[in-house]
Image: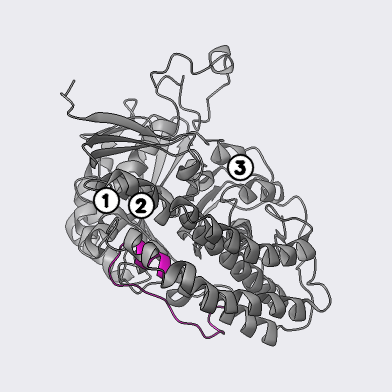
């Protein structure tokens, strides 16, 4: 047993600032963290095991709860996996519908991020604002799919329903509102707020070297200045037909991670607008049998979800169920960096550092 | 893509076999699990991280799929190897790829594979006193699992 100076503090697992059930054990001396240990598994529901006893088409409700803040992205990823394994082509309209819904979900996910980091800094107004804007998009998802948090909209071969009538007008209305709020109101609350800048600048620096060491992806990686986005580098869905920029930061601290996500919301709005403009007519789903068999093969798919590069590796053996489904969670890798970046951080900044990595324990623990 | 395989073949000879390209993913079979670290050191020259480690239980052997990825290019390479002997052990890659640390802990947790010389081989997702390794195909829900309360854990 090592001798401990100062005290050992449990942050979590049931703590409103850890965004779910993450537990961090920190050794504190004075007001500074000396050592941090991340413990997880409190939300482990055995989703990989569940895949082995379910038909391919019965797994969609489970992926919804994988990353419950960006459920549609999870559905798109799993649907792409099954389609790649079974060799199913999806119609062009379904490709665009998926792109639109995935980007709307990305905006919603980043708005939750903005809100929760505001809440962790004591800025409750910021949280309510972000959730208010998210509600507009939530209404769109509800209208399209019937669900809100776990919409279950995608299916193998396309989507369950077509987009409703006048969807483009309603979406445009919501997007304009989100865009103006981010460009104007959020400046006073976040991006140009001195208090916010003081609390986030230079906190929890995650530089390029650490990003490559830990295998961190997504906005956390782009905030360190690495220009990489799977939507650009290996385009899937309709991302090669739309025009958008990859947002990168410079410092890799909590503030640049925040700013990257704000920038990505604006880029996602651009993508949704272009897709709604170019939305082709035609069928929205390729009919596939409910029970299908996939031959003996291994399939690997990775996509850019709001939290980074999520991947699935499926081993099939000719049956109606996967033999093994492995899910790669991006925040699983990001949380490991927490043990390094929390060292030297003040106690009050612990929650900001955790929140700035945007962990969702549903996908970490699976 | 082919050049990575040629590089591996140059050192390891006929111990590696080619599975072919599928999209951006390139699969290689490594016949002898003892050569894994040597192969990883060669791959380290071109790739940055261990992207994921997908283990599958084919009783009585285990299949390990190491997916490597790079930050500068879209290529991925998959090294597949098998554990056939009864000790369920393989060399760790943490010295070559630091990102392997938690992936290997997860494989230990869910499959019971022992990674030799791993710096911190503990359970990660399940509680420390959990009976058995649930992703193995022969895992059955015993009374011990059913009656597990977690009250014995130190918190």
Residue appearing at x 35%, y 37% in the figure = B105
Residue drawn at (65%, 73%), measured in percent from left and top? A100
Residue ID for mark 3: A51
> How far apart in space, not on screen, are marks 3 and 2 (Cα)?
33 Å
Q: CA distance from mark 1 to mark 3?
A: 35 Å
Residue that appears at 32% across and 47% down? A338
State the colouring used for the structure image: one colour
Q: Label 3: how many residues lie within 10 Å, few (<14), some (14-19) or many (20+)? A: many
Residue A341 numbered tag = 1
- Give the foreground label among 1 and 3: 1
Query: Dot 1: what SS?
Result: helix
Q: Is residue A65 above or below residue A157?
A: above
Q: Residues within 10 Å of mark 2 (few under 14, many from 20)?
A: many
- Specify which label sits upstream in the sequence, 3 or 2: 3
**Looking at the rendered structure, which numbered label has been put on residue A353?**
2
Q: Do pointers 3 and 2 mark residues of a single chain? A: yes
Instruction: Tell me the quarter of the image containing the C terminus of chain B.
Output: top left
Asked if residue A358 can be seen in this view, the reply is yes
Residue closer to the observer: B89 or A190: A190
């Amino acid at each position: 047993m090592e001798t401990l100076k100062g005290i050992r503090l449990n942050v979590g697992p049931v703590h409103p600032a850890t965004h779910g059930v993450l537990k961090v054990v920190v050794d504190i001396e004075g007001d500074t963290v000396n050592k941090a240990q991340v413990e997880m598994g409190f939300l482990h529901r055995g989703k990989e095991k569940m895949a082995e006893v379910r038909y391919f088409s019965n797994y969609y409700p489970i992926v919804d709860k994988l990353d419950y803040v960006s459920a549609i992205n999870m559905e798109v990823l799993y649907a792409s996996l099954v389609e790649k394994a079974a060799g199913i082509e999806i119609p062009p309209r379904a490709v665009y519908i998926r792109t639109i819904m995935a980007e709307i979900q990305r905006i919603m996910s980043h708005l939750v991020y903005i809100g929760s980091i505001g809440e962790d800094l004591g800025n409750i107004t910021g949280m309510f604002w972000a959730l208010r804007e998210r509600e507009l998009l939530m209404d769109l998802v509800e209208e399209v799919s019937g669900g809100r948090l776990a919409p279950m909209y995608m299916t193998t071969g396309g989507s369950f329903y077509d987009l409703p009538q006048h969807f483009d007008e309603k979406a445009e209305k919501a997007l304009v509102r989100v865009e103006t709020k981010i460009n104007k109101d959020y400046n006073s609350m976040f991006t140009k707020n001195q208090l916010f800048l003081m609390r986030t600048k230079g906190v929890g620096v995650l530089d390029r070297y650490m990003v490559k060491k830990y295998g961190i992806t997504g906005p956390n990686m782009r905030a360190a200045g690495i220009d990489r986005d799977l939507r650009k580098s290996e385009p899937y869905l309709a991302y090669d037909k739309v025009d958008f920029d990859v947002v990168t930061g410079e410092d890799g601290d909590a503030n640049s991670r925040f700013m990257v996500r704000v920038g990505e919301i604006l880029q996602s709005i651009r993508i949704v607008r272009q897709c709604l403009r170019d939305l082709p007519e035609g069928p929205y789903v390729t009919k596939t049998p409910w029970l299908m068999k996939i031959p003996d093969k291994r399939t690997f798919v990775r996509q850019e979800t709001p939290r980074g590069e999520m991947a699935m590796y499926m081993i099939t053996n000719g049956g109606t169920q996967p033999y093994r489904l492995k899910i790669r969670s991006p925040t699983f890798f990001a949380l490991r960096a927490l043990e390094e970046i929390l060292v030297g951080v003040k106690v009050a900044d612990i929650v900001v550092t955790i929140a700035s990595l945007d962990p969702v324990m549903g996908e970490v623990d699976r | 893509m082919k050049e990575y395989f040629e590089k591996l073949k140059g050192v390891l000879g006929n111990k590696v076999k080619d599975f072919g390209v599928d999209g951006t993913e390139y699969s290689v079979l490594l016949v002898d699990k003892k050569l894994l670290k040597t192969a990883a050191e060669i791959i380290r020259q071109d790739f940055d991280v261990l992207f994921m480690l997908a283990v599958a239980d084919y009783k009585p052997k285990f299949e390990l799929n190491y997916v490597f990825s790079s930050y500068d290019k879209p290529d991925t390479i998959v090294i597949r190897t098998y554990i056939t002997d009864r000790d369920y052990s393989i060399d760790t890659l943490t010295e070559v790829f630091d990102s392997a640390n938690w992936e290997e802990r997860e494989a230990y947790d869910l499959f019971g594979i022992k990674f030799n010389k791993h710096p911190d081989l503990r359970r990660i997702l399940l509680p420390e006193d959990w009976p058995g390794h649930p992703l193995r195909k022969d895992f059955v829900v015993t009374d011990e699992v059913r009656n597990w309360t977690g009250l014995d854990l130190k918190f």
